[in-house]
Amino acid sequence: SISSGTRASSRSARRSGSTSRAATHVGPGDCIDEVDGDAVVRVHVQPRAGRSAVGAMHGDALRVRVQAPPVEGRATEAARALIAETFGLPKSRVELVSGERSRTKRYRLTGLSAAAAVGRLGTVLGPLHG
């Protein structure tokens, strides 16, 4: 029907953002800030994924898929472990700063500068995302 086609195209437009936003390139550096000499990475956690993996960008956040369910902090802890592995850090140096009960989280990478974090993330994501 016509109304369902309109709804689908509206959903598609909302998903892709406005035309000015869609034209803007978002790269790995856009999800990383530096606070007191440490990198702070913004992530969008997708729990109950088929497999755990660091994916492409989700707006200005890094998409992190984890198999763990969002129950009792299990997805948050799984995301922390995956972030540590991705950036080559021990889990003890990856600290949740905000978003304990949200899909959007911020993790501090202690002892890693933003520039170094962007470099490592660019290596992991490859040339298509940087």
Image (tube, grey):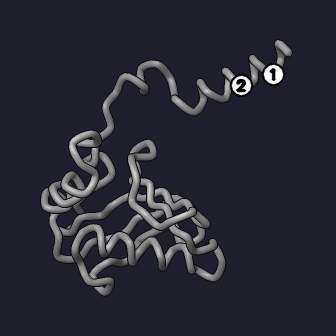
Neighbourhood count class around disc 2 (C-alpha, 10 Å): few under 14, some 14–19, many 20 upward: few
- Tell me where residue 62 sits by quadrant: bottom left
The x and y percentages for residue 65 are 49, 61
Residue at the disc numbered 1: 4
Amino acid, disc 1? Ser
Residue 80: image x %, image y %? 41, 75
**Quarter of the C terminus within the rendering:** top left
Q: Is residue 30 above or below residue 43?
A: above
Q: Is residue 7 above or below residue 68?
A: above
Q: Is label 2 in a helix, a strand or a loop?
A: helix
Where residue 93 appears, x then y in whole percent? Answer: 27, 81
How many callouts does the rendering have? 2
Q: Is residue 5 left or right of residue 78?
A: right
Q: Residue furthest front?
A: 50
Q: Which mark is residue 94?
A: none
Who is closer to the viewer here, 121 or 126? Answer: 126
In what quadrant of the picture does the N terminus appear?
Answer: top right
Q: Residue at x 63, y 73 (%)?
A: 69
C-alpha distance separating marks 1 and 2? 6 Å
Q: Quadrant of residue 8?
A: top right
List the single residue furthest toward the top: 2
Please state which amino acid type lies under the numbered disc 2: Ala
| Residue 8 disc label | 2
Circle 1: is it few (<14), some (14-19), or many (20+) Cα within 10 Å? few
Where disc 1 sits, the SS reads helix
Verify CB contact (< 8 Å) between mark 1 and mark 2: yes
Residue visible at 47% across and 76% down in the picture: 78
Left or right for 49, reference 105? right
Q: Which residue is at the front of the view, 5 or 92?
A: 5
Q: Residue at x 44, y 42 (%)?
A: 59
